Amino acid sequence: MKPALLPAFLAALMLCAPALGAGKTWIANVKLVSPEKLDRIETGSVLIDGGRIARVERGPSTAAPLGATVVDGQGYYLTPGLIDSHVHLHVVPGMRMEQGASGDSLARAYFRQMPRSFLYYGFTTVIDLAVSDYGTIERLRKEPLHPDVFHCGEPLVLANGYPMSFFAPDKRFQSFGNYLFDPAMPTAVPEQFAPSAHTVAAGVARVARAGGICVKTHFERGFGAERNLPVMSNAKFAEVRAATSQAGKVLVTHANSFEAQSFAVAGGADVLAHGMWHWGALNGQAGLPQEIRTLLDTIVERRTGYQPTMQVLYGLRAYVEPDYLNHPALRKVVPAALLAWFSTPQGQWFKPEVTDGEVDAAVLQGMEAPLRRQRAVVAYLAGRDANFVFGSDTPSSPTYGNLPGLNGYREMRQLHAAGMSLAQLFKAATINNARTFRLDGELGTIEVGKAANLLLMKTSPLEDISAYDSVVTVWVRGRQAAREALAADAR
C-alpha cells in the first residue's frame, strides 16, 4: 500500500473497531504544527495513549511503542483539533424552531449527522453559547463520534429584551428560564414570574450548576420588526461582571454595534460575540472613524476575545445566491433529504424575512455596506494582532446558510480575505480559544498530557487557507476517524 494512503486506510479500520480508538496510536514522521511553537514546524512523532497525548518527539521517528498502531504521517501535517466557540446546537439550520424540536424525520437525520459535520471540517471542540435544550447536548454526547462540547448554560437575558422579544409575550418567559429584571429598564412581566427568583446571582448560579464554563449576555437594541428593545443598564451589567468573576466563568457579550461593543468593553466583558457591522451615526463614513479606532485599541490592549462572525451576514445572503444550494460541499454536511427540502416552498419559508419585499439583487447590494464596515474592523484588529477567538455562529438565525462545519470553514475564508493572516486564524481556532475560555490545560496545542484532539492534513494551515479543507484524519480523545467516513453522503 502507498504510504500516502495509509492514514486514511487505518482511520477507516479504526471506525470499524471503536474499542481500538482509545488505545495506543503512534503518528510518525509527520510535520508538527502547534500554535505555541510556530517557529518550529518540523518533523516529529506523537503517541496517543488512553485518549491523551502521551509523548511528543521532534526529529526522526524512533521505534514505535510496543502495542501501538502506527500511522505514517510522512508528507502530512499534524495540528491540534479546531475549536469553534460560537455554536447553537439545538437549532436545525433552515427550520422553524417548532419543526426542529418536533422530532420529525428531517430533524432527526440532521441531529445524527451534525456532530460528524463539525468533525468533517476539523472542529473537535464546540462551545454552545446559549443553551435552549440541554437534551440536545446530552444526545449529541451519546453519538458514537462527536466533538467535545462545552457551553455557557442558559443565557442571562433581560426581561422582554433580545432575544426574548422574538417570542410571543405569553411564551417568552417559559422559553427563557434565566431572564433578569433591571429596575433601570421597567417592563411588563406576567404575575407568576417573581423578580426575586431572577437575580443576577441566581442566574449565574444556574449556569454554574448546569456545568457552564461561561456566561452569555446581550446588548442588542433590535433589528427587523423588533427595534428599540430594552438593554442592560451599566449597573446591572456590573452585577453580571462581578457574579461571573466570582463564579470563575468567562463573560461573553453579544454585541455587533459600536454602541454595544463600547458598552461591553467598558463593563469588562471577556469576549465580544460578533463583529462590528453597525457603526450608528458613523455608518456613512468611508474609512474607519477615529472613535472606533480608539475603542479597537482598547480591545487590543485588554486582550478582549473578539469573534468577528462574518458568516452571520453571508448566511443570510445564501437565500439570494442562486447557486448556493447546488454547491457540492453542502452534500458533505447535511443529509440529502434535508438538502432537497431546502429547495421546496416549505424550505424557503425564511427567505421573505431575509428579503423583506426587496428583489434579490437589492438584498445583495444592501449587505455590502455592513460587510465593508465589518471587514474594516477585522483588518484594523489584525494589524494590531488582537486576541481573535474563532466562532462561526452556527447557525446565527434560522438560515440554511450556516451549516455545521462548513460554516466554520467559510468563516475562516472570509476572515482571511478581510485581513487576518493564516497564523492569526490558526491561533484563533486553537490556542486563543483555549486560553480565553480557560480550556488551555486540556486543549489547543500538541503537548503532553492534553486531550488527543488532533487533525492530519495534506496542507499546512500556515501555507494556504484551503488546508482546512484538506483534513485526512480526525482524532477526538484518541478515537480516530477518516474524514470521508464522516461525510453526510457517506452514510
Image (cartoon, rainbow, N blue to C red):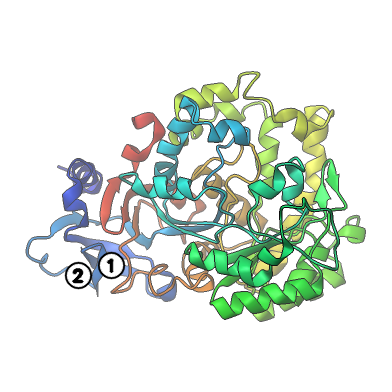
Nearest the camera: 52 or 461?
Answer: 52
- 252 shown above or below 323: below
In the picture, measured across the screen, residue 56 lies left or right of residue 282, that is left
Nearest the camera: 223 or 295?
Answer: 223
- Which quadrant is the N terminus positioned in? top left
Residue 99 bears which disc, if any?
none
Circle 2 SS class: loop
Label 1 amino acid?
Thr
> Which residue carries the number 2 mark?
60
Nearest the camera: 264 or 371?
Answer: 264
Label 2 amino acid?
Pro
Circle 1 SS class: strand
- 402 shown above or below 350: below
In this view, the residue farthest toward the front is 192
* Residue at (84, 29) in percent of width and height: 358
Residue 255 rendering spot, x and y as whole percentages: 73, 61
The reply to whether residue 94 is in sight is no
- Which quadrant is the C terminus positioned in? top left
> Which residue carries the number 1 mark?
43
Residue 266 rendering spot, x and y as whole percentages: 76, 76
In this view, the residue farthest toward the top is 345
Residue 121 rendering spot, x and y as whole percentages: 44, 47
* Residue at (56, 41) in percent of width and height: 91
Q: Are marks 1 and 2 in contact (CB under 8 Å)?
A: yes
Residue 416 rendering spot, x and y as whole percentages: 60, 56
In this view, the residue farthest toward the left is 66
The reply to whether residue 418 is in sight is yes
Q: Quadrant of residue 65?
A: bottom left
In the picture, measured across the screen, residue 61 lies left or right of residue 252, that is left
Q: Quadrant of residue 299?
A: bottom right
* Residue at (49, 45) in percent of width and height: 405
